[in-house]
Amino acid sequence: MIKTLFSIVFISFFTNSIIAQPKTDKVFFGVAYYVEYMPYERLDKDVKMMKDAGINVVRIAESTWSTEEPQNNVFDFSHIDRVLNAMHKAGISVIIGTPTYAVPAWLVKKYPDILAETPNGKNKFGARQNMDITNPHFLFHAERIIRKMLEHVKNHPAIIGYQIDNETKSYHLSGPNAQQLFVQYMKQTFESLDKINKAFGLDYWSNRINSWEEFPSTDGAINASLSAEYAKFQRKLVTDYLGWQAGIVREYKKNNQFITQNFDLEWRGYSYGVQPDVDHFAAAKSLDIAGIDIYHPTQDQLTGIEISLGGDMARSMKDGKNYFVIETEAQGFAQWVPFPEQLRLQAFSHLASGANMVSYWHWHSTHNGLETYWKGLLSQDFEPNPTYNEAISIGKDLKKIGEHLVNLKKKNKAAILFSNEALTAFESFGFGWGVNVKYNDILRPYYDALYKMNIGVDFVDPTSKNIDDYSLLIVPALYAAPESLLQRLNNYVKNGGHIVYTYKSGFSDENVKVRSTIQPAIINEACGISYQQFTIPNNVSLKGDPFLVGPENNQIHTWMELITPTTANVLAYYEHPVWGKYAAITENTFGKGLATYIGCITSNLVIEKLLADAVNKAGIKSVDQKLSFPIITKSGINEKGKNIHYYFNYSANPISFEYLYPSATDLLNNKSIATNEKITLNNWGFIVLEEN
């Protein structure tokens, strides 16, 4: 039954549907709004305050299944009706979320098996996202509430689109139902146990599987191939589940309405890097518009990096199409309350990466529950405050110049190749016992360095067809990859591309089985190097400080590969009485292109120097590189066909710089700016210029 639901419905949806992004003619400025959470009646006052702030869209209903279906098969959408009618009267658009990520108590009481079983045991009721998304009882009731809601609201003129579920994942699902589905998946993928045993090396420690009926739970797996394949399967569950929901919603939505989802990133107290539990590129295929939730440090820690990274990822999900920031912070955690002018800086930073919506989670602050101290635009007193007042200024700005900023098109010449498969494989054993480094720990310093030198970045993954469109490709820790991808990357270099690899690339095949060849496997042809051994450095630096970064930044740490160049030019050797004969960083001409290989973990300053050199050699250096963090600049072409240039000051001090593009208009101040004119940005300030 589940197989039918996840395969037939999903495949039919993709086979019979053409997804076209609905036309967006304005920048959406919004909030999540939950009238159900309010301690007293104030809908009309909230609407008035939203109008005063320039809010033109609200997101509702995605978290209150128990209000919408208080008892089994008893429905109450009166609170949704009230909000829809009030917003429509005020000219505020509405996005309705399917309420499936937080299950009601009556459903769990009736079907306890709805709660997911994980490697840590069975989930308990109370938290959100505690359910088994493959459970037939859950799926039946989820489909019913979606259909009942949409049948009720589908003709309301306030609705512009639908959000399916919320930050969806498989939630580490590993119960009997999921394990049974995994066995079916393995049968379809590998066809025979002999192929699995050989590909995964399951003879080790008597892990060999000799009949499908004996296929063990993956909870105790010590085999990286098996655990990585299960993680891939879990990501597919998410893709199929979202495709299933999108298929239902598509039956009801109007042609001018969209379907979106609020994807999130790896969480380290804020949005940090590639999401391990979701294949964003695959899951986004069922959406009209990619959506993302981006949370980040503020105050003295505000850099804009997480805003940029999340935006670049969301834009790349749909081949460069504009995206929605469905959630970002207003006040947020206590440590996130923004300094004056930071809320404005953040909002326009989202737009500079190609966002067509900036929406806060949330409008008001709750008075009880887990998120009591995750504050919205309004605090618990619901009165105007400095953050709300600053939002008013953003709303006025967007009303004034939004038509110049909407649907910004960006064309970047650099990309980062990330891989969910490589992430999972690397994190299975990583560098071995005792070294706690994750995939995003490797990716982020390279992204951050490009950001700080004002290089626009896209993300590509192994399924991307447009890799050859980029002049510079950064490939962090491509630990697991099929030979076809590695040969494709060799051809990319051969045909004129510049690639920068880090350590642990090409190491294992797509089944996370280490290749039985000299490393780095296959890509050694383009890199012109080989190595057989690696170690953890102790008091090792780069010989002669080749990048002029000083003693402290010249040290390497955590990991080093003992590289022997074949045809490569050595950019840096190790400084060490034993390892000094080995190369640390190399560069090789291959065909028309260039391959750089970084075989150790260096300081961030060395990474910045290496990437600055790569940018120059790839021929993508521009006048933007005359500026660097804390001055960040981003550009694009607007719907009028004119170049837009954003300049942001991510610091607490005023900074001046010279404007080097053709003459332009300061859109916010309606002021002309000449080429070579000096511009001064106040602390946490920004300027938006449109070339004349």
Image (cartoon, rainbow, N blue to C red):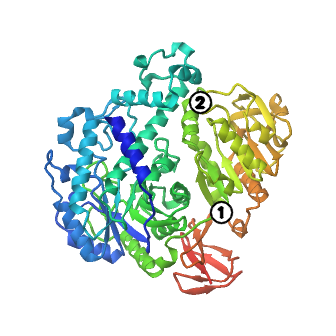
Q: Picture coordinates of residue 487 (x, y %)? A: 71, 40
**Where residue 265 sits in the image (x, y, percent)?**
48, 49
Instruction: Tell me the kind of residue under disc 2.
Output: Val
Q: Which residue is mark 1?
A: 454
- Asked whether 328 or 232 is in front, the reply is 232
Residue 271 horizontal/vertical position (percent): 48, 51
Q: Is residue 298 visible?
A: yes
Quick one: which residue is furthest to the top in this view? 206
Q: Residue at x 46, y 46 (%)?
A: 267
Which type of secondary structure does the marked residue at label 1 adopt? loop
The quadrant in which residue 692 appears is bottom right
Nearest to N terminus: mark 1 or mark 2 = 1
Q: Amino acid at mark 1?
A: Asn
Q: Using residue 265 as the reference point, say whether residue 360 is left or right of it.
A: left
Disc 1 versus disc 2: nearer the observer? 2
Q: Which residue is mark 2?
A: 512
Left-right relation of 672 to 344 = right
**Extreme residue in the front direction:** 16
Quadrant including the N terminus: top left
Q: Secondary structure at mark 2?
A: loop
Crowding at mark 2 (Cα within 10 Å: few <14, some 14-19, many 20+): many
Q: CA distance from mark 1 to mark 2?
A: 35 Å
Report whether residue 263 is seen: no
Label drawn at residue 503:
none
Of 480 and 7, the residue lying toward us = 7
Residue 591 horizontal/vertical position (percent):
82, 48
Quarter-wise, where is residue 434 in the image?
A: top right
Tags 1 and 2 in contact by the CB under 8 Å rule?
no
Name which residue lies at 25% across and 70% down.
46
